Amino acid sequence: MAQKSRYTIVIDGLSSYTRSRDIKYEAERYGKVEAVERDARARCALVEFTSSRDADRAWEKMDGLRVDGARWKVDWATKKDFSFFGWKWTEGGYDRSPSGSPSRSPSRSPSRSRSPSRPSSRDGSKDERADLAP
């Protein structure tokens, strides 16, 4: 079983219209949010809370939430999710640089694929809607 974060959730199924600040707004209903990072291509986001209790409440309440016409699938972030976003895994979340922002690798390629164990557009399969976009 994959190790899961106690403070960070991953949201799949975001609408292309949903912005990071929209995600933060929804998440802050359940507690103090430390960081939000959204990947527009994969239509997913990581949300880190300062408290594991707040993260647990958000995980329960936000799963299935409809925002901008899309239904969110919320789960606990794993090491693979952290890696996908370029965040360094630690027991309670990610390492912080001196500036207070998440530690990230210097080069982040948007073409990385996800583990085939999670069904979503991040699993490397072609997104059919991409062919329809102008």
Image: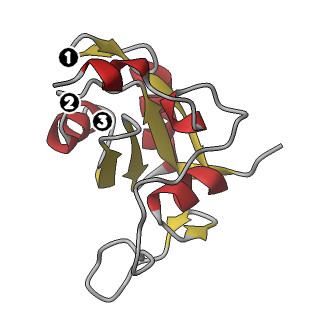
Sequence-wise, which precedes: disc 3 or disc 1?
3
Q: Residues within 10 Å of mark 1 (few under 14, many from 20)?
A: few
Residue 107's quadrant in the figure? bottom left
- Residue type pointed to by label 3: Ala
Q: Residues within 10 Å of mark 2 (few under 14, many from 20)?
A: some
Sequence-wise, which precedes: disc 1 or disc 2?
2
Q: Which mark is residue 27?
A: 3
In front here: 111 or 23? Answer: 111
* Secondary structure beneath label 2: loop
What residue is at 42 percent from the left and 63 percent from the top? 109
Pinpoint residue 45: horizontal percent, then vertical percent: 38, 42
- State the separation of the CA atoms marked 1 and 2: 6 Å
**Decide: marks 1, 2 in contact (CB < 8 A)?**
yes
What residue is at 21 percent from the left and 43 percent from the top? 20
In front here: 103 or 32? Answer: 103
Pinpoint residue 13: horizontal percent, then vertical percent: 41, 24
Residue underneath mark 1: 68
* Secondary structure beneath label 3: helix
Pinpoint residue 23: horizontal percent, then vertical percent: 25, 36
- State the separation of the CA atoms marked 3 and 1: 15 Å
- Residue type pointed to by label 1: Asp
Q: Which mark is residue 18?
A: 2
- Give above or below for 7 relative to 63: below
- Give above or below for 78 relative to 67: below
Relative to 26, is 112 on the left or the right?
right
